[in-house]
Amino acid sequence: MTTTLTVTAENILSVNTLEAEATIDRLLADWQQHEKQVQFEIVFPREAMDPRELSEIAEIRLWFIRLDAKYPWLPLLLDWQGGELARYVAMLVPHQFHPKDGIQFNPEALEIFVMQKVFVLMNWLQGQGMQGRSRVQGMTQMLGYELEDEFFKVLGF
């Protein structure tokens, strides 16, 4: 069952993540039931002539940076198939948007993001008493990275 977190302009402009935190904290009690089920609805009015994508608006990005600082393992809950993982990454990783080609991430920034999430997610999952290698490999594949089992063994995961 999909859970939608609505983020309003008021939340964004005040960098207030409390409503989202309340929902995420509730989902955390049984997080595996909500794995890959969370979506964001961003309500942020713009001028009709504003060509920017939501991920190109600094205030929205700042809100997501704050949320990610509180819940760095949140990618596990996002609806990957529905595009939420890519949209979330776009909020946190420098990129350019091309009308024809879509989002083009800065390659080095994306690589740093992916590796940081690998460490965070593997540590968090181990803390939950879970084997996380396949989950993390699935996430990195969605972002264009193929991590072999040997890589995880070298790191002690």
Image: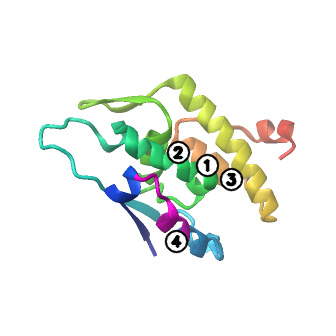
When the figure is inspected, residue 110 is found, relative to residue 19, above or below; the finding is above
Numbered circle sitting on residue 23: 4
Tell me residue 3's x, y (percent).
45, 71
Kind of residue indicated by mark 1 = Ala
Q: Which of marks 2 and 3 is nearer the N terminus?
A: 2
Res. 51 in view: yes
Identify the element where label 1 is drawn: helix
Tell me residue 79's x, y (percent).
47, 59
> What is the span of residues highlighted in magenta in the rendered image?
14-22
Kind of residue indicated by mark 4 = Thr
Q: Which of marks 3 and 1 is nearer the N terminus?
A: 1
Which circle, 2 or 3, is nearer the viewer? 2
Q: Distance between the residues labelled 2 and 3?
A: 26 Å
Q: Which of 136 and 71 is in front in this view?
A: 71
Characterize the local packing of mark 4: few (<14), some (14-19) or many (20 or more) Cα atoms within 10 angstroms.
few
Proximity of marks 1 and 4: CB atoms separated by less than 8 Å: no
Which circle, 3 or 4, is nearer the viewer? 4
Residue that mark 2 sits on: 65
Q: Does the magenta stretch include residue 139?
A: no
Which circle, 3 or 1, is nearer the viewer? 1
Q: Which of 107 and 133 is in front in this view?
A: 107
Numbered circle sitting on residue 69: 1
In the rendered view, does 112 fall on the left or right side of 44? right
Q: How far apart are marks 1 and 4 (CA)?
A: 16 Å
Residue that mark 3 sits on: 134
Identify the element where label 2 is drawn: helix
Q: Earlier in the sequence, mark 3 or mark 4?
A: 4
